[in-house]
Image: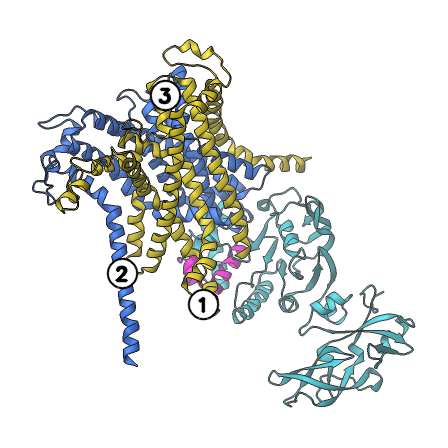
């Protein structure tokens, strides 16, 4: 009797350990590349390029960061601050505009029945499906005519259209999570439909809208294909373009490049952490229930 | 009379709300697409702007079909996507099932799992360019110092290894999308059908195949739809990791477009290629979206 | 405190009509219950009164105003929703005062009215809580409080008790009745539960498939149903309905057994007419165990029946038996335990039995 019980227990133990081991391995594979880059950002090139590899850092330094921002002994002359500012301005502006457009559109899909509804939704999605590089060709030509090359505004406009479909999809999902009886109760209580939206539905969807905003921000922050073609100088070049330039220009300054990579990734990680659960609920609720 | 006006106004509201979105997409995507199509039917070269008037009908497209570089890139892209997406789906499913089983620290695991998704593709490309570098990349360093290999493995140079490397990078970046959505599906799944199946005598595999998997399909299709929207982000990865090389060994459709259009300035030709890739993406997205809608309907009944 | 009138009100979705031109007069302070099975149009009708659904045809009047084109906020009505629809991001106090705030009332008036309503419903201690922190019954009361606070012309209730468990439902029913007595306002109440209808209503409106089947006081609808649908919908357990044929002074049932025609209906029947005999379980009982059986022998029919099943309910039992091959439920009053298989003499109170024309389903009592 006791042997059977303990055999099952042992099996369960082994399974649990196996589960943990696999998960651990998995997390390592996920985190390691990123961690290696982050680590390299704080080490001098000498260490990174050493053979055999120096696993445990002997010397940690902030030199690389100083370097790329233009301080310190070894100035590199890549205007990372300019790239950072451009990325920030472009991403924030396009996000805010995309959200405003998206809230209206998302609400329309969530609350109304109208002709062509499904077709319109599909249309929005399909527009989004156009590959960035494919879209960059005609936009490059058109934007040249319009004087929008190498202008923050040029990228902002493009990024708004890049973000609108997905923002609408997410916000549609978030509004659907709010029972329509709340809006009806507000209308019976004396609100116009607009007042009911502002006082009841919008506040309740706020966190979801913020999540959609973060997603849009990240899309703009991380975009490369269009940015690479529509920008020329530090007037408008964004961080991803900067990193690519860096790798082309300073092919062996891995430490410096890693530092730049860290600057790109940190805001993204922070924002992701803040909104993870909202994103999933917005995607799936709208996605599965229709 | 008032009633008619009021109903008319009410009926217009959704359209009014959607107007900004529609206008944006129209001007920033639709118009350029039309222009792109027009350009693809000209012999436009950036270096000689007047050539945009040079209308050649479908010559660019015909040339494409005769062009072996194009077909090679096309094929490579298809293989790339086929492998990457399937691997992402299977891995994502495995990860989701794994995390579902773990109770302690699940939230942290889920958060960690989301990280790769938030990296800029440029970053992912850079990261793996660093790691796969045959001289100073830690992969080769590790392999050599562990004694598993004696020479530098040309991860980014050899044709097959390079394809492997870019696929690895792409899978690393996008598996999370599947994992997260499938995990959400697993969370949302009602326990009763599973328990009923167990009582009815099904083993774990049968429960998975007949109960769990069908329930997860809508979530899988959401993930596929989302992926197909962003499938061209692989361009960023390849551009930074290998630039489509060396010697075109990792040339995908998108890097070819960039090369022909911007490096060689042959805009007409590039637009034709771009159109092919656009149609591919749209067809992909449309396909999965319709599957999603069908699966929704199916699951809606079950729910 | 206004009356509500519905004139040939129609609701259609495209070509499909769900409410077919109903007429209804609801008086000042009257408590009217719309009752019927799912899909009968009762909620749709209520929502048309509220202004949450467009009116496809006919007119709705609140007081003397035609309100067809008025949005909900201009109709001066309040509504209690099935899922309460409390504003989750506001405290109970803010929930109660929301309507007044929108109307621009001074904070002093708002505080007064909120306190008044809270006191009436026992919510005074809960004003600072959020809806998430409340129990089902408490949420229900907040929903009612929100309705009271605005002193509307009418209260509309849309199946407010459906989400509560049976015990709570009983309590809340009493509270709603008390509310009506305190706050003397017209109430239109929708439910699918005929017990709620019977206990709460001044008048009941029985609906089916978008039509009004009968309007009357609970007793009228219970004692004088106009057709077989109302007869089987109102009253629990439902009325037994036996098909038969008129022959002379008797109703001949499917197995040729005979039941006398209820004396009061003798001049309403015609020879050979196909009819349905309706007997409520309360009106058919074993000899000596009935309630209120008529003394007059002419008003009572006697049948020998075999007991199939007995469900003891305490001081009464529900007896399942069969007449002419059809299952019939009967009531036994008293503590006697009956076994399946026993054959007993049953008495039928003909004075309270009903006859319906089989073809039209209409009661013979009605013209």
Chain letter for the residue marked with disc 2 in the picture? A
Do discs 3 and 2 belong to a common subunit?
no
Number of other residues with Cα within 10 Å of mark 3, as a class: few under 14, some 14 to 19, many 20 or more: some
Q: Residue at x 74, y 80 (%)?
A: C322
Screen quadrant of the C terminus of chain C = bottom right
Residue A176 in view in this figure = yes
Compared to C15, does C197 lie above or below?
A: below
Tell whether position B64 is magenta.
no
Q: Colour of chain C?
A: cyan
User: Magenta segment range?
Assistant: C122-150
- Asked if labels 1 and 3 touch by Cβ distance under 8 angstroms, the answer is no
Asked which secondary structure carries label 2, the reply is helix
Vertical comparison of A109 with B58: above or below:
below
Work out whether residue B197 or residue A86 is closer to the camera in this orientation and state it.
B197
Image coordinates for residue B61, horizontal then vertical, percent = 47, 22
What secondary structure is marked by label 1?
A: helix
* Mark positioned earlier in the residue sequence (3 or 1): 1
- Chain B drawn colour: yellow
Q: Height in image: A63 above or below B205?
A: above
Q: Is residue A74 left or right of residue A128?
A: left
Residue A240 in picture, x, y percent from top left: 28, 30
Q: Among the chains, which one is blue?
A: A
Please name the residue shown 44% across and 14% down the image.
B43
* Tag 2 residue: A18
- Does residue C136 show up magenta in the picture? yes
């Amino acid at each position: 009797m006791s042997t059977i019980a303990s055999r099952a227990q042992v099996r369960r133990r082994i399974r649990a350990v196996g589960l943990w081991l696999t998960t651990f391995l998995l997390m390592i594979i996920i985190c390691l590349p990123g961690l290696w880059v982050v680590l390299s950002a704080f080490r001098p090139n000498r260490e990174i390029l050493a053979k055999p590899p120096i696993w445990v850092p002997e010397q940690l330094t902030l030199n690389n960061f100083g370097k790329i921002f233009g301080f310190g002994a070894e100035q590199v002359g890549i205007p990372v601050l300019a790239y950072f500012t451009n990325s920030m301005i472009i991403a924030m502006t396009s996000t805010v505009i995309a959200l405003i457009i998206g809230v209206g559109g998302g609400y329309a899909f969530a609350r109304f029945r109208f002709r062509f509804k499904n077709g319109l939704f599909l249309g929005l999605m399909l527009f989004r499906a156009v590959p960035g590089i494919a879209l960059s060709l005609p936009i490059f030509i058109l934007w040249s005519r319009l004087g929008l090359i190498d202008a923050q505004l040029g990228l902002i406009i493009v990024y708004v259209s890049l973000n609108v479909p997905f923002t609408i999809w997410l916000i549609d999902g978030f509004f659907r999570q709010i029972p329509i009886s709340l809006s009806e109760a507000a209308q019976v209580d004396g609100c116009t439909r607009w007042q009911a939206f502002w006082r009841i539905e919008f506040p309740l969807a706020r966190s979801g809208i913020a999540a959609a905003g973060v997603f849009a921000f990240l899309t703009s922050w991380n975009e490369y294909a269009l940015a690479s073609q529509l920008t020329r100088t530090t007037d408008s070049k964004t961080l991803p373009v900067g990193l690519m330039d860096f790798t082309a220009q300073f092919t062996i300054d891995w430490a410096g490049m890693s530092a730049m990579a860290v600057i790109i990734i940190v805001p993204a990680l922070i924002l992701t952490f803040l909104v993870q659960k909202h994103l999933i609920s917005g995607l799936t609720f709208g996605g599965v229930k229709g | 009379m008032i009633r008619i006006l009021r109903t008319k106004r009410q009926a217009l509201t959704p359209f009014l709300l959607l107007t900004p979105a529609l206008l944006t997409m129209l001007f920033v995507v639709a118009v350029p697409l039309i222009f792109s199509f027009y350009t693809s039917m000209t012999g436009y070269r950036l270096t000689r702007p007047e050539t945009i008037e040079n209308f050649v009908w479908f010559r660019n497209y015909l040339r494409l079909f005769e062009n072996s570089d194009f077909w090679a890139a096309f094929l490579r892209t298809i293989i790339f996507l086929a492998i990457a997406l399937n691997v992402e789906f299977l891995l994502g499913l495995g990860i989701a099932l794994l995390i579902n089983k773990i109770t302690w620290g699940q939230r942290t695991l889920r958060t960690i799992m989301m990280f790769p998704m938030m990296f800029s593709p440029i970053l992912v490309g850079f990261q793996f360019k660093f790691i796969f570098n045959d001289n100073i990349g830690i992969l080769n360093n590790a392999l050599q110092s562990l004694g598993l290999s004696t020479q530098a493995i040309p991860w980014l140079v050899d044709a097959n290894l390079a394809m492997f490397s870019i696929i690895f990078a792409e899978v690393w970046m996008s598996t999370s999308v599947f994992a997260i959505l499938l995990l959400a599906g697993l969370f949302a799944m009602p326990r009763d059908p599973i328990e009923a199946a167990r009582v009815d005598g099904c083993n774990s595999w049968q429960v998975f195949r007949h109960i769990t998997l069908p329930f997860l399909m809508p979530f899988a299709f959401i993930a596929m739809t989302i992926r197909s929207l962003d499938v061209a982000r692989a361009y960023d990865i390849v551009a930074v990791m290998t630039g489509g090389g060396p010697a075109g060994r990792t040339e995908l459709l998108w890097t070819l477009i960039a090369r022909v259009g911007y490096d060689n300035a042959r805009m007409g030709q590039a637009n034709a290629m771009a159109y092919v890739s656009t149609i591919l993406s749209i067809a992909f997205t449309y396909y999965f979206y319709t599957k999603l809608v069908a699966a929704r309907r199916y699951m809606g009944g079950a729910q | 405190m206004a009356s509500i009138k519905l004139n040939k009100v129609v609701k259609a979705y495209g070509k499909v009509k769900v409410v077919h031109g109903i007429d209804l007069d609801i008086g000042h302070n009257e408590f009217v219950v719309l009752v019927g099975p799912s899909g009968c149009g009762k909620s749709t009708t209520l929502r048309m009164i509220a202004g949450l659904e467009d009116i496809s045809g006919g007119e709705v009047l609140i007081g003397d105003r035609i309100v067809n084109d008025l949005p909900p906020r201009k109709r001066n009505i309040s509504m209690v929703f099935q899922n309460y629809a409390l504003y989750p991001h506001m405290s109970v106090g803010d929930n109660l005062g929301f309507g007044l705030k929108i109307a621009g009332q001074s904070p002093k008036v708002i505080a007064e009215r909120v306190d008044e309503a809270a006191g009436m419903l026992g919510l005074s201690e809960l004003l600072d809580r959020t809806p998430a922190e409340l129990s089902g019954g408490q949420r229900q009361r907040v929903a009612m409080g929100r309705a009271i606070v605005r002193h509307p012309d009418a209260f509309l209730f849309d199946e407010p008790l459906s989400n509560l468990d049976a015990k709570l439902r009983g309590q809340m029913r009493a509270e709603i009745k008390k509310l009506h007595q305190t706050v003397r306002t017209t109430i239109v109440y929708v439910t699918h539960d005929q017990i709620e209808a019977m206990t709460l209503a001044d008048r009941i409106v029985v609906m089916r498939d978008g039509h009004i089947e009968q309007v009357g006081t609970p007793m009228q609808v219970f004692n004088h149903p106009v057709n077989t649908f109302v007869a089987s919908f109102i009253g629990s357990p439902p009325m037994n309905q036996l098909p038969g044929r008129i022959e002379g002074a008797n109703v001949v049932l499917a197995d040729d057994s005979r039941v006398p025609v209820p004396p009061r209906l003798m001049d309403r029947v015609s020879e050979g007419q196909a009819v349905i005999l309706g007997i409520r379980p309360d009106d058919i009982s074993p000899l000596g165990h009935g309630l209120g059986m008529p003394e007059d022998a002419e008003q009572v029919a006697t049948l020998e029946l075999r007991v199939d099943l007995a469900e003891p309910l305490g001081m009464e039992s529900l007896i399942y038996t069969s007449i002419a091959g059809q299952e019939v439920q009967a009531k036994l009053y008293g503590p006697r335990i009956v076994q399946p298989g026993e054959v007993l003499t049953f008495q039928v109170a003909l004075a309270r039995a009903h006859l319906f024309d089989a073809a039209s389903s209409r009661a013979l009592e009605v013209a």
